[in-house]
């Protein structure tokens, strides 16, 4: 990495404004932002009027390592993320063995240090019997504790109410929840098995993992958080009804209860199951056009705080199974920012709001130290975007190890040109520089 890099003539999207200027990077940090900067010792990179945004921070990914590396691995998925403009990610504990002790958590951090091109953090997973591990988690070095309040992950389901009460009352750190009511999902599954046997259509997914299942669990999590003054973050909101659980009446930094929208719930609806089938089978399910509209409304009104991917690859062969055996999840990290830029081109969201929801707000929500903004003194996590360079998603340009995408065949209107991770130009017009790895995220919490 050149000790000094000078990015010239860019349109900087940051903190609600777009300004024209230059950015000087020194030793991995943003040294200066100004209308015009000269430095004879800096390597000059000309932006030619393109858009410079803060790197995306993705608070929910599943990179499948250890134990599930036939689907994905930290090395491949971090590269995929960087190519998509994601400079930092927070990865989930449902691997093999699951990340449910602080010792196993540190082993994953060692993997990240060794293999991840992007900056990284890893959640500690909660179970019905590891509350003591939750209490010991390091608030400055770990993003949060993950609770699966739904059947998405089998043995990591936390369904004991006393345990949940203990975790919500004693966790020293943000609690991130997957909220679907297990009993409701199980009952709905039996109804559809009785009707269709093994041939349940994928169109039933949003009816099995229903609005009721999501709302019962989300509202229960909110009630626990309010009772215990917990710091709760509800992941992947999929229904309009759930958006009523959140407020926009106070600033994000003062919220104790926050929420996330994922790109698939903003892009797809149940009308797409007929064509896409298992390729858009996620938990919680993609639901109705009306749900999608209300999620958008909540996102733009600040009831929903951040945008994430829930990047969760499975092999294409696994996805070819019938409904009951086709796993839920799919690869999204490479295409989420460009998907949001398509919405910008449609007039649905501004560039400033994309930067807010994918970078600023995530940094604020998790109290990440000196990332998420283009500010002097901050780590230089940056994305140079060509708004007008179209490209089509094809098998040959999909970087996730699983080799497929629900966006395959779609032509995006914008391209990611360059990506800096902690000041290192890690991605440049299709080429990676892997000579430096990403860094462990730090959190400014007391």
Image (tube, grey):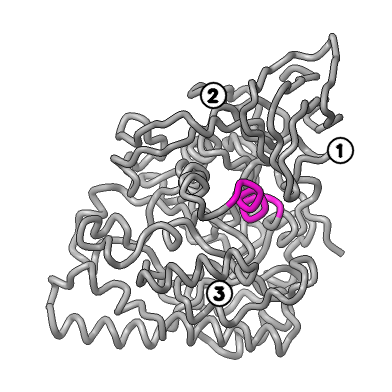
Q: Which residue is identified by label 1?
A: 377
Number of marks = 3
* Circles 3, 1 touching at the beta carbon (< 8 Å): no
Residue at the spot 31% in from the left edge and 34% down from the top edge:
394
Q: Is residue 329 left or right of residue 346?
A: left
Q: Which residue is identified by label 3?
A: 127
Secondary structure type for disc 3: loop
Secondary structure type for disc 1: loop
* Circles 2, 3 touching at the beta carbon (< 8 Å): no
The main secondary structure of the magenta stretch is helix
Label 2: how many Cα within 10 Å (few below 14, some 14–19, many 20+): some
Mark sitting earlier along the chain (1/2): 1
Whole-number angstrom distance, CA of label 3 to CA of label 1: 39 Å
- Front label number (3 vs 1): 1
The C terminus is located in which quarter? bottom right
Q: Is residue 63 visible?
A: no
Label 1: how many Cα within 10 Å (few below 14, some 14–19, many 20+): some
- Where residue 205 appears, x then y in whole percent? 29, 72
- Where residue 443 appears, x then y in whole percent? 78, 55
Residue at the spot 61% in from the left edge and 60% down from the top edge:
306
Nearer to me, 253 or 222: 253
Q: What are the residue bounds of the magenta stretch?
A: 350-360
Name above or below for residue 198 compared with residue 59. Answer: below
- Where residue 11 appears, x then y in whole percent? 69, 32
Q: Which residue is identified by label 2?
A: 432
Name above or below for residue 47 compared with residue 343. Answer: above
- Front label number (2 vs 3): 2
Secondary structure type for disc 2: strand
Residue at the spot 39% in from the left edge and 31% down from the top edge:
391
Q: Is residue 291 visible?
A: yes
């Amino acid at each position: 990495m050149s000790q000094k890099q000078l990015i010239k003539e860019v349109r900087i999207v940051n903190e609600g404004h777009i300004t024209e200027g230059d950015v000087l990077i020194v030793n991995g940090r943003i040294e200066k932002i100004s209308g015009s900067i000269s430095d004879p010792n800096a390597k000059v990179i000309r932006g030619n009027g393109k858009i410079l945004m803060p790197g995306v921070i993705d608070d929910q990914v599943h990179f499948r390592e250890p134990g599930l590396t036939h689907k994905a691995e930290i090395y491949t998925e971090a590269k995929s993320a960087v190519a998509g403009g994601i400079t930092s990610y927070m990865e989930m504990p449902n691997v093999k063995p699951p990340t449910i002790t602080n010792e196993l958590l540190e082993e994953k951090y060692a993997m990240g240090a060794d293999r991840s091109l992007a900056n990284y953090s890893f959640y500690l997973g909660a179970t019905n019997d590891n509350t003591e591990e939750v209490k010991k988690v390091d608030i400055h070095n770990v993003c949060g504790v993950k609770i699966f309040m739904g059947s998405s992950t089998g043995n990591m389901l936390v369904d004991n109410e006393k345990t949940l009460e203990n975790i919500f009352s004693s966790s020293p750190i943000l609690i991130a929840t997957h909220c679907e009511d297990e009993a409701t999902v199980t009952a709905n599954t039996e109804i559809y098995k009785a009707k269709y046997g093994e041939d349940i259509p994928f169109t039933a997914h949003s009816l099995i993992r229903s609005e009721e299942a999501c709302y019962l669990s989300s509202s229960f999590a909110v009630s626990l958080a309010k009772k215990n003054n917990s710091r709760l973050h509800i992941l992947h909101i999929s229904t309009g009804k759930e958006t009523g659980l959140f407020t926009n009446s106070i600033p994000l930094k003062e919220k104790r209860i926050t929420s996330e929208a994922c790109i698939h719930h903003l892009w797809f609806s149940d009308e797409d199951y007929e064509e896409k089938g298992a390729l858009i089978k996620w938990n919680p399910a993609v639901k109705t056009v009306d749900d999608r509209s209300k999620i958008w409304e909540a996102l733009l009104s600040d009831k929903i705080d951040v945008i994430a991917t829930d990047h969760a690859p499975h092999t294409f062969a696994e996805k070819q199974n019938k409904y009951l055996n086709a796993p839920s999840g799919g690869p999204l990290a490479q295409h989420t920012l460009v998907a949001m830029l398509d919405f910008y081109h449609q007039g649905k969201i501004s560039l400033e709001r994309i930067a807010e929801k994918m970078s600023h707000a995530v940094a604020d929500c998790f109290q990440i130290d000196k990332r998420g903004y283009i500010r002097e003194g901050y780590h230089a996590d940056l994305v140079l975007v060509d708004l007008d360079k179209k490209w089509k998603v094809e098998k040959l340009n999909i970087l996730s190890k699983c080799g497929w995408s629900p966006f395959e065949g779609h032509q995006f209107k914008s391209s990611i040109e360059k990506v800096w991770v902690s000041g290192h130009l890690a991605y440049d017009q299709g080429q990676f520089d892997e000579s430096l790895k990403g860094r462990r995220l730090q959190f400014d919490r007391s």
